[in-house]
Amino acid sequence: MIAAPAPAMEADRAETVEIQILLQHLGYEVGTVDGIAGPLLSGAIRAFETDHGLPITGRADAALGDLLHGIVAAGPSRALLATGAAPRHGFWQRHSWPARMGGL
């Protein structure tokens, strides 16, 4: 007898915030990052699943969080690539002594 796979566990509020942040980082519109799974988050998840050839569930769960962490860690975001803007140095890198004296 083969056991049916366990259903994916829904993400708790902290995990949902992470999923929202990671999806937003990848260029998907998630609405307000508040840890609440609403229609915008569900739509963003479905769009992500469609773009990556995954089964369409629209659910924020631990497996999705793990997948998003792996994708974000593996490469730059689509949002950053879409802007084409070069990363800017922070305040201290722009205003440090070497920069003012012709260095960096």
Image (cartoon, rainbow, N blue to C red):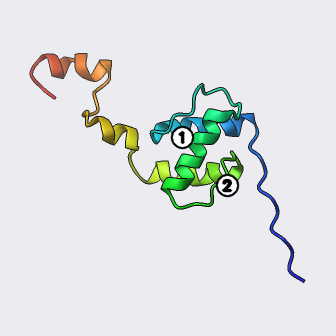
Residue 54 appears in which quarter of the rendering? bottom right
Q: Position of residue 38 (x, y in %)?
A: 69, 33
Q: Which residue is mark 2?
A: 63
Report the amino acid beneath label 2.
Answer: Ala
Q: Position of residue 42 (x, y in %)?
A: 64, 41
Judge the density around disc 1: few (<14), some (14-19), many (≥20) Cα neighbours within 10 Å.
Answer: some
Disc 2 element: helix
Residue 12 seen in the current view: yes
Disc 1 element: helix
Q: Position of residue 18 (x, y in %)?
A: 62, 38
The vertical placement of 35 against 82, above or below, is: above
Q: Is residue 30 left or right of residue 12?
A: left
User: Disc 1 to disc 2, how far (Cα)?
Assistant: 13 Å
Q: Position of residue 21 (x, y in %)?
A: 56, 35
Q: Quadrant of the N terminus?
A: bottom right
Outermost residue on the bottom side: it is 1
